[in-house]
Image (spheres, rainbow, N blue to C red):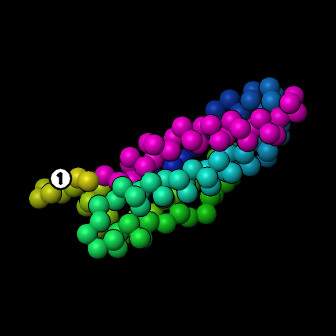
Amino acid sequence: MADINVKWSGLDNLIEELGVTAGATIEAAASAMKITTGQVQATAKQVAPKRTGYMANNISVDPVKKTATSVTGTVNAKADYSSFVEFGTYKMSAQPFIRPAVSAAQSLFIKTTIDKLKEAATFK
């Protein structure tokens, strides 16, 4: 399982500069997180080693969780042996599929968040 946690620092300055409310900022990040976790899921399914396809077919996305100050997206690899494949064991080398998918999607999250914030900004 991989957790993607986004923590904003300097949120008040960003809100002031953009002219958006804290709620609009969190909504923008939540929307971007939903898109990003979907992309992570798709990439992980594509990259996951497939013998039977069970592991790749059991990669899911939990609903995005948001609080007043954070947004959390979770992608789950639900096969019991997923962590052994991802991190390896003393008998087999790792074949990562979640971590590369998360790394590949980081820029998507940043770009999507910026785009969503621009849509919400009052200085358009």
Instruction: Answer yes or no: is residue 61 visible.
Output: yes
| Extreme residue in the left direction | 91
Most prominent secondary structure in the magenta stretch? helix
Left or right? Give the position of 108 relative to 25: left
Question: At label 1, which amino acid type do we have?
Answer: Ser
Given residues 20 and 112, the one toward you in this image is 112
Look at the picture and state if 58 lies above or below 64: below
Q: Is residue 93 left or right of residue 83?
A: left
Helix, strand, or loop for circle 1?
Answer: loop
Q: Which residue is mark 1?
A: 93
Residue 34 in the image, given as x and y percentages of width and height: 62, 55
Q: Relative to the observer, which residue lies in front, 5 or 109?
A: 109
Residue 116 among those drawn in magenta: yes
The residue at 53%/53% (across/down) is 39
State the image quarter where residue 69 is shown: top right
Name the quadrant containing residue 54.
bottom left
Could you tell me residue 46's position as x and y percent?
A: 40, 58
Q: Specify the segment rendered in magenta.
A: 96-124
Residue at screen point 62% across, 37% down? 111
Looking at the image, which is closer to me, 110 or 15?
110
Task: List x then y, in percent, for residue 117.
Answer: 75, 38
Residue 83 appears in the picture as rendered: no
Res. 43 image quadrant: bottom left
Was residue 55 drawn as part of the magenta stretch in this picture?
A: no
